[in-house]
Amino acid sequence: MVLVLVLSACDQIFPGESDSTAPESLSGINGPADSIESQPIPELGLEWFTGTQEMADYYMVELESGLENAVLLTPRSGSEDYKLVFVYTKGHKLFDRAVEVVLTTFRGQGLNPSALIIFVADEFELESGLGFAETQGYDLIFPNGSSPTALVFANYQGGQLPVVSLLSKDPVLLGQVPDYKGGSGTNIAFTSVSVPVEIQMQYFLELVPDLKNIILLYDETNSSVITTQVEPMDEYGKEYDLNILHLAITQVEEVEAARHDLNEQYENVMNEFQGSADSGESTVFLLTNSGSLVQVFDTIVDLAGDIPVLSMMPDVVQEGEVSAVMSVGVSFDSNSILAAVYGIQILEDDIDPGLLPVGVIEPPDVAVNFLKSRQIGLGIPFTLFESATYVYDALGNLARQQGQVVQP
């Protein structure tokens, strides 16, 4: 259950303290409460921001007139008690979802925040956007993704406002903090969507004990994925005698270009695979935490055929046949809740963000899809089923969510 994971992480971070900042209820996380009248999602004409139904139901969603490329969310009822800033460097529905989950977690604690969502292309736009936030009395910044976090880290250490990273990869491997326990010593607190490769592989090897070949899929333009997942996987392969083949794409801006690039690289990798490994040995496709690959995930599943698709990103195990068999990682919802808990601790309890250790989720989120496993003739051990946070049944329907049985 995600709530249990977050509370567990908070208990480790703040031993002996009350868990009063953990969300009391996540009932609004997948939809509005019954008392909220559904509102249409406004058309803002922005390529980088779509918004969610939850945002429209709870907030007035409009362009911020005082800043270019910015959206303002103002509570439809009650007075705001905190003003939050979310920084984007690219648009994605997962980033919009993260904003929704953070706001829901704040509301679960009886808080009523407003939100400014800004798009920045470089350090100059970041300086302008955060300067505006400072003059307008904003309270806390959430850089949304690894790239915005890196931009804020490079240009806003020591800034006026506290910062909590959101949907960002391992800050230790990225060189942003020296270790997981000591904190940054600055105005920035870090959370992580990464899980150490050694832990992920324990789960994957339980599913495929005789695994020999891993076809690793990633976005070659995503430096944080390469640093935190690709390079550690290469090292793991060397240590444990696994054949790691790279399937990396570079054309990620347009969907059709990404599909074409994926097909070309797939042919190259499969040719290499036939020449360097015994195709009769156990092989898997392993998808890294590259958000840009989500848009072509259906093509990945088609290309894999009967080869199991595994993932470091729980969100690609989903209903139906266009799904990975299993994933081990930190779901974006889990990380968003934990980042919100950090933000609440900083604002409500006046905790110094620089003293907070790296926020991690332990154990990781595990998701399995029995429909996909049966299609390719791969059994899922009971221990994996038992520990899974998300389970999709033999028909591909959601049967367990956040550790709880889903009623039909």
Image (cartoon, rainbow, N blue to C red):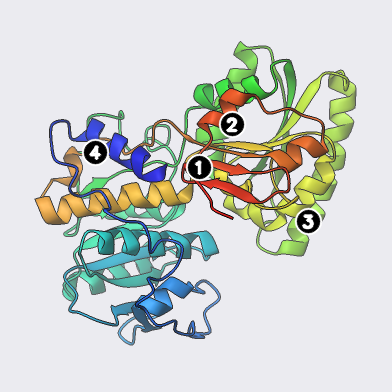
| Res. 385 mark | 2
**Pointers 3 and 1 in contact (C-beta within 8 Å):** no
Q: Nearer the viewer, residue 28 or 394?
A: 394
In percent of width and height, residue 235 lies at 58, 20
Q: Secondary structure at mark 2?
A: helix
Whole-number angstrom distance, CA of label 2 to CA of label 4: 37 Å
The quadrant where residue 324 appears: top right
Identify the residue under disc 4.
184
Whole-number angstrom distance, CA of label 4 to CA of label 1: 19 Å
Number of residues whose C-alpha sits closer than 10 Å to that of mark 1, classed few (under 14), some (14–19) or many (20 or more) = many
In percent of width and height, residue 90 lies at 51, 63
Q: Earlier in the sequence, mark 2 or mark 3?
A: 3
In percent of width and height, residue 34 lies at 39, 74
Whole-number angstrom distance, CA of label 3 to CA of label 4: 40 Å
| Res. 210 mark | none
Identify the residue at horizontal 67%, vertical 44% (top origin): 393
Q: Amino acid at mark 4?
A: Ser
Q: Amino acid at mark 3?
A: Arg
Q: Earlier in the sequence, mark 3 or mark 4?
A: 4
Identify the residue at horizontal 13%, vertical 45% (top origin): 352
Q: Secondary structure at mark 3?
A: helix
Identify the residue under disc 3.
259
Q: Is residue 164 visible?
A: no
**Pointers 1 and 2 in contact (C-beta within 8 Å):** no
User: Residue farthest to the left?
Assistant: 350
Identify the residue under disc 1.
224
